[in-house]
């Protein structure tokens, strides 16, 4: 068995969810690793870090807590190659980019169950809390086909916790203070669980209340924003996770889990755009939006069963729900809905599906895996418009997605392994309804768009060489695809766009070379990558279409390339230092085609060319930890909300760089009870990710954590 694990350098048959460099299930003894819900992990190929160390593809729970990263976008952004941003505009959504790929191209899962919004997949990563997360897995470039469809540029998976002791209890509370040390909000977390010989049970609850956050001291007040507390910056989020499982023997496990999260948020206004009606022709359209609820629910069953000594069967079955209300008001008071811009837009989504994966050890050096995935998405939407108050009839979209994948892991020698994989994905659209004036005219009614299906073939390979136990080198190539959303295919965008039912899948070929080297107390990880994107979805104007209208077509080509470096070092028994650096460059071209008008100017936005994070954990005396850390990024391109003359030409410009200093100090008062305090953005840097929407200035926090 020891030969098998080292030669194959992937998952053990009994625990095949994690492919780690230099770590095997037999050698893994850290308590933190044990808290990860193994059935909920996906296949990753990076090294799992210890403690607060930050890995190339994994961020553990201790690091999430220590760096005070309470939402997914904040936490993932300290992983190399991952960038956080903000949509700006009226949606107020927090974003994550993985090596330049956006939320449409990098699927998000919780315990391996995909969170997908079939209408537009505009996930707001700020709504996903992290206190109950054991680890965040971020697969970059090479995402195993066994994990399922859609991973054009990678995948993100939130792995919940699982109890490790007969009685496991944890409680946390954090008071957040603004720049003037006034109340800014709070977050709390509680967990209770038990693990017995043949079963386990656990429940956890996390809640985050943001009353407001303060702008930096260097912000100059405008007509829309007077500084200090950011207007409309309040949010409310909570998540409940409960699971129960049975472990009848050393190899099998069967678990049922329930997750529900509820959120509500507001949308800060652009700090300089004119929002006072009546509007000046050509000025931006004001939007005063809020979300009274943004809720996700999931019930899922996960299992792993050993079939004799050579085979393992893993299954997943789930039912997901997403409910959302977007309200648009007349003005910034958000008290009336009487104008034509006011509406209430409802989304009611349901999904169910499952997957099965069979792993067979054909020989001691050869393992073959076969996986099948199925998912049905049902999207229901309707809107109440004003001033009439008329509510549309419910419109429904129904779609099935399938994937069949195979992967073979061959240990060519004890030091050299080769993994080859392929999958075939297809999408079956059964219903696509819309309410309004149908093509060709007539009275408003429910009509159906033309139905069009799509399919894509994916393939990949990875070569890994371990000349010695402390060194690992790899090279990989992966050809992946992702299907466009309902929004991309059918949305008319308030009458400014035409549908395109035949929109094809985007495709990317991702190349990577890299390695890991452990030199005593120092661990170094390095990777260089290149991605060739084709058939990218872009909005163009058909030559015969009216000015100001667009249609999405597969006319984009792009090249993304860069490098990542991570270093951790145990300088002494009381000092750990670490850091990572990412370089990302992106080029995008729009292909010309007869009968279309391509944009005169187009640039990729939101991702800085350089990004870094450095930290230290110093323990000058027992029970005391001082953790300074610095996050920095170079400037990035953004799109101005107003456009210059001539009209219709996007106006891009470069945002400034930023350096954000942070500090945390923890003291363990008694065993299991820790008091902490700290600050974010110590330098009070006044910076922004997107035009007109500055980020938070200096803030403080105080916390209490108790564990048993």
Image (tube, rainbow, N blue to C red):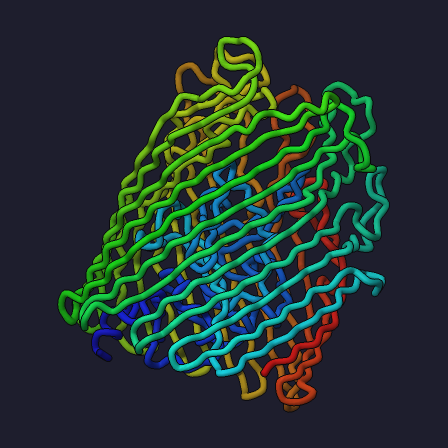
Q: Position of residue 633 (x, y in %)?
A: 60, 55
> Considering only vertical position in the picture, is 492 above or below 210?
above
Tell me where residue 245 sits by quadrant.
Answer: bottom left
Task: Find residue 401 and report its horizontal and vertical position in percent.
Answer: 36, 40
Q: Nearer the viewer, residue 627 or 189?
A: 189
Q: Residue 63: x, y in percent?
A: 56, 70
Image quadrant containing the N terminus: bottom left
Q: Residue at the location (18% across, 67% down)?
A: 361
Residue at image point 46% right, 35% down: 485
Identify which residue is drawn at 77% across, 46% down: 232
Residue 33 appears anywhere in the view:
no
The residue sitting at the left extreme is 363
Q: Residue 640: name its quadrant.
A: top right
Q: Judge whether 554 appears above or below 459 on screen.
A: above
The C terminus lies in quadrant = bottom right
Residue drawn where x is 78% and y is 25% of the image: 338
Instruction: Name above or below for residue 84 compared with residue 254.
Output: above
| Residue 580 visible somewhere in the drawing | yes
Residue closer to the observer: 408 or 219: 408
């Amino acid at each position: 068995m020891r030969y098998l694990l080292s030669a194959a350098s992937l998952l053990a048959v009994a625990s095949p969810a994690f492919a780690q460099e230099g770590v095997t299930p037999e050698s893994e003894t850290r308590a933190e690793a044990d808290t990860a819900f193994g059935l909920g992990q996906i296949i990753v190929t990076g090294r799992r870090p210890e403690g607060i160390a930050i890995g190339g593809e994994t961020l553990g729970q201790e690091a999430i807590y220590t760096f005070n990263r309470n939402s997914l976008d904040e936490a993932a952004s300290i992983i190399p190659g991952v960038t956080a941003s903000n949509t700006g505009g009226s949606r107020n959504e927090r974003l994550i980019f993985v090596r330049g790929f956006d939320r449409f191209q990098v699927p998000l899962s919780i315990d391996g169950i995909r969170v997908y919004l079939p209408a537009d997949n505009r996930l707001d990563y700020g709504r996903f809390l992290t206190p109950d997360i054991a680890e965040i897995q971020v697969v970059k470039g090479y995402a195993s086909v066994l994990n399922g469809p859609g991973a054009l540029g990678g995948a993100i998976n939130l792995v919940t916790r699982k109890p490790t002791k007969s009685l496991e209890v944890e409680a946390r509370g954090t008071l957040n203070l603004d720049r003037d040390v006034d109340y800014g909000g709070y977050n709390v977390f509680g967990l209770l669980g038990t693990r017995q010989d043949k079963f386990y049970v656990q429940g956890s609850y996390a809640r985050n209340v943001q009353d407001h956050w303060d702008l930096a001291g260097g912000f100059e007040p405008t007509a829309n924003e007077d500084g200090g507390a950011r207007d409309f910056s309040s949010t409310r989020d909570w998540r409940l996770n409960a699971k129960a499982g049975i472990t009848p023997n050393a190899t099998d496990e069967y678990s049922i889990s329930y997750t529900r999260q509820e959120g509500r948020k507001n949308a800060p206004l652009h700090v300089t755009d004119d929002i006072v009606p009546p509007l000046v022709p050509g000025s931006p359209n004001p939007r005063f939006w809020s979300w009274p609820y943004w809720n996700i629910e999931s019930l899922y069953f996960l299992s792993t069963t050993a079939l004799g000594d050579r085979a393992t069967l893993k299954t997943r079955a789930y039912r997901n729900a997403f409910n959302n209300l977007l309200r648009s008001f007349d003005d910034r008071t958000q008290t009336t809905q009487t104008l034509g811009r006011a509406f209430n837009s409802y989304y009611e989504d349901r999904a169910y599906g499952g997957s099965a994966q069979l792993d067979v050890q054909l020989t001691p050096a050869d393992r073959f895996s076969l996986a099948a995935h199925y998912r049905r998405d049902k999207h229901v939407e309707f809107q109440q418009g004003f001033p009439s108050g008329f509510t549309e009839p419910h419109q429904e979209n129904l779609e099935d997605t399938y994937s069949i994948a195979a992967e073979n892991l061959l240990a060519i020698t004890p030091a050299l392994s080769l993994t080859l994989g392929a999958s075939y994905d297809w999408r079956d659209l059964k219903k696509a309804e819309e309410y309004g004036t149908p093509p060709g005219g007539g009275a408003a009614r429910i009509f159906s768009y033309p139905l069009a299906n799509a399919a894509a073939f994916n393939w990949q390979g990875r070569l890994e060489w371990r000349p010695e136990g402390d060194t690992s080198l790899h090279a990989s190539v992966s050809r992946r695809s992702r299907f466009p959303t309902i929004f991309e295919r059918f949305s008319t965008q308030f009458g400014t766009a035409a549908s395109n039912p035949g929109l094809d899948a985007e495709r990317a070929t991702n190349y990577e070379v890299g390695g890991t080297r452990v030199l005593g107390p120092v661990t170094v990880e390095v990777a260089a990558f290149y991605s060739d994107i084709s058939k990218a979805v872009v909005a163009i104007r058909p030559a015969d279409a009216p000015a100001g209208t667009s249609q999405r077509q597969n006319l984009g080509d792009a090249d993304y390339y860069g490098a990542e470096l991570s270093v951790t070092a145990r300088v002494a028994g009381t000092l750990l230092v670490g850091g990572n650096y990412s370089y990302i460059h992106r080029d995008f071209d729009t292909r010309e085609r007869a009968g279309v008008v391509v944009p005169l100017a187009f640039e990729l936005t939101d991702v800085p060319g350089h990004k870094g994070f450095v930290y230290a954990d110093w323990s000058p005396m027992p029970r005391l930890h001082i953790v300074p850390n610095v996050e920095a990024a170079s400037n990035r391109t953004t799109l101005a909300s107003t456009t210059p003359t001539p009209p219709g030409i996007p106006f891009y410009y470069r945002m400034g760089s930023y350096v954000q200093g942070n500090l945390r100090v923890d003291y363990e008062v008694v065993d299991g009870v820790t008091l902490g305090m700290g600050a974010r953005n110590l330098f009070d840097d006044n910076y922004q990710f997107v035009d007109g929407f500055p980020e938070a200035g200096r803030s403080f926090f105080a916390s209490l954590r108790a564990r048993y």
